[in-house]
Image (cartoon, rainbow, N blue to C red):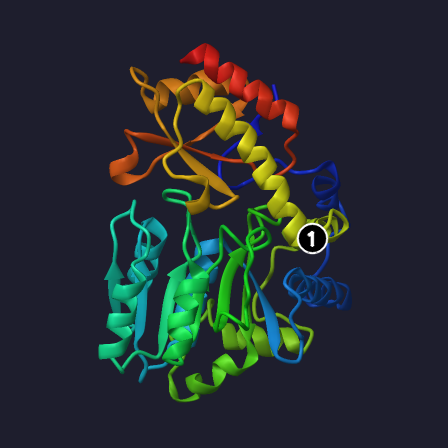
Amino acid sequence: MSQILLNPGPVVLSERVRNAMLRPDLCHREAEFAELQNTIRHDLLKVYPLPEDEWAAILMTGSGTAAMESMMTSLVPDHGKVLIIENGVYGERLTRIAEIHHINHQTLHHEWDEAIDLKLLEDELRYHEEFSHVAVVHHETTTGRLNDLAGIAKICKKYNLPILLDGVSSFGAEDIEFEEWNIIACAATANKCLHAVPGTSFVICNRNAFEEMQATPQRTLYLDLASYLKNQDANSTPFTQSVQTFYALSEALKELQEQGGQRKRKQNYWDRLNIVREGLEKKSIHALMQTKDCSCVLNAFHLPERIDYETLHDALKENGFVIYAGQGSLSQSIFRISCMGEIKEEELLRFVSIMGGIV
């Protein structure tokens, strides 16, 4: 039985994207690869139309965390200091990256179920003039919360602070106003909202972001964004890239545009999640948060009474569905559902029906 993946990546692939990986093998030093790489970089900027003379899509082989780490290590100068906003696992991961690389930082911590306190953020920025950047997660998949990026950006713009955005679980589906929201870089990945495969990640970066870094020694070898940008602008690559995953991403980006682009994908996700939310609510399985606080990409639900996650997971897997556990202190109280990828509405209706039989 084929599995319907309701986890937040990898996703169920379309046959078109899967078959793209069967294209001819390429050497990453040949002109054909440069053409493939350039096409992907161009098409990534089309997702949220950005001018190529001001912005760059910088590709690397690695997971979304590689893109996060690359963004943090490559764009915060030695004389700078980044304020990292936490309200889940992935905000805390940004902090861990800063700690490992000895990047000057301060955290603005919230509990995992909390919305970001904008007043608290403004107080931090008002009384700490040493900050050079703010780093934040857009969609915190720990809980499914979509952080109020517009509100955060309004405050950051007031204090002339650029945003380093973790868009790993939002890029390609949620709205992102790069210039209006003072975003200087956004880390993301191929295998979530873009419906490609794991192995390729990227940073959408304002080209001016590197100006402050000229006096800062290179912090990493493999993850140095400036090196990738220089090489990719010259039709090259500093390291061997995963050619087959590039093929998949290129095809997935074409598929996204043909299907109506980011805004249409966002609507499709909500149509699917509403089937799940409404269906489970009728079976007394309640969502963790109200729709207005959630991302279209993933929602979390309270575990039904008298059933643990492992039992629920295994029963669903026997019927062809893979769900996702809660993390940390939430592991015993919630499960998570994402509706990315090649999933039909009738499959979600079947999922809801099977849930009713289990609980």
Residue 25, image x, y percentages: 73, 52
**Residue position marked by numbered label 1 in the rendering:** 261
Kind of residue at disc 1: Gly
Dot 1: element: helix
Q: Where is 242 relative to 317, above or below? A: below
State the residue at coordinates (30%, 44%): 113
State the residue at coordinates (25%, 54%): 110
- Label 1 environment density (alpha carbons within 10 Å; few <14, some 14–19, many ≥20): some
Q: Where is 344 relative to 236, above or below? A: above
State the residue at coordinates (22%, 78%): 127
Residue nearest the observer in this picture, 164 or 250: 164
**Relative side of 234 to 315, left or right:** right
Residue 106, image x, y percentages: 24, 69
Residue 52 visible within the image = yes
Image-quadrant location for residue 335: top left
Residue located farthest toward the bottom when viewing the structure as drawn: 215
Residue 105 visible within the image = no
Residue 170, image x, y percentages: 52, 52
State the residue at coordinates (25%, 71%): 124
Residue 269, image x, y percentages: 59, 40
